[in-house]
Image (cartoon, helix red, strand yellow):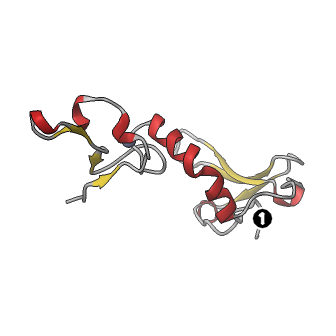
Amino acid sequence: MSQLKYCQGPRCHTYDTKDRKKGPKDNKRNETRRRSSFYYLDHNACSMQCMYDWFDVYGSRALDHFGRITQPKVLTQDNAWRKNYDWNRDNNHRHYVYNHLTEERREITEQQYNNDNIITEDGRLTI
Ligand SMILES: [Zn+2]
């Protein structure tokens, strides 16, 4: 069974919806939404509004914490590799790696295609 968790939107409780209303007539209040799963903010916010609210309050601090981009990131022919395949009706798909700057295409096996290590996270070919 999945655990209930709270929406991380800092203003979630300020949006006036029926499902946020809690308490008896003489002590009504709105509370942060609590659910087993969320869709936004990597499964941490109940709505796009709550996701943006989170970013408005914490976004800059998160960037400072995890490190800002201070130099341009550069795509060259060394890190422009992607995996792809041509679909075939007979299920014998042709797998390949493709350099989308030079347009070079190299055939690979299905086994290589399914190997997450043949192209690094930043697009470098390791085979
Ligand atoms: Zn929310």
Q: Quadrant of the C terminus?
A: bottom right
Q: Which of 115 and 30 lies nearest the eye of the viewer?
A: 30
Q: Position of residue 113 (x, y in %)?
A: 62, 60
Q: Quadrant of the N terminus?
A: bottom left
Residue 65 found in image quarter: bottom right
Q: Position of residue 88 (x, y in %)?
A: 58, 41
As drawn, is 125 to the left or to the right of 101? Answer: left
| Residue in the picture at 27% in, 48% down | 35
Q: Which of 24 and 81 lies nearest the eye of the viewer?
A: 24
| Residue in the picture at 38% in, 41% down | 12
Q: Position of residue 57 (x, y in %)?
A: 55, 47
Q: Position of residue 54 (x, y in %)?
A: 51, 46
Is residue 8 shown above or below 123? above
Residue 120 found in image quarter: bottom right
SS for dot 1: loop
Displayed-image quarter of ligand 1: top left
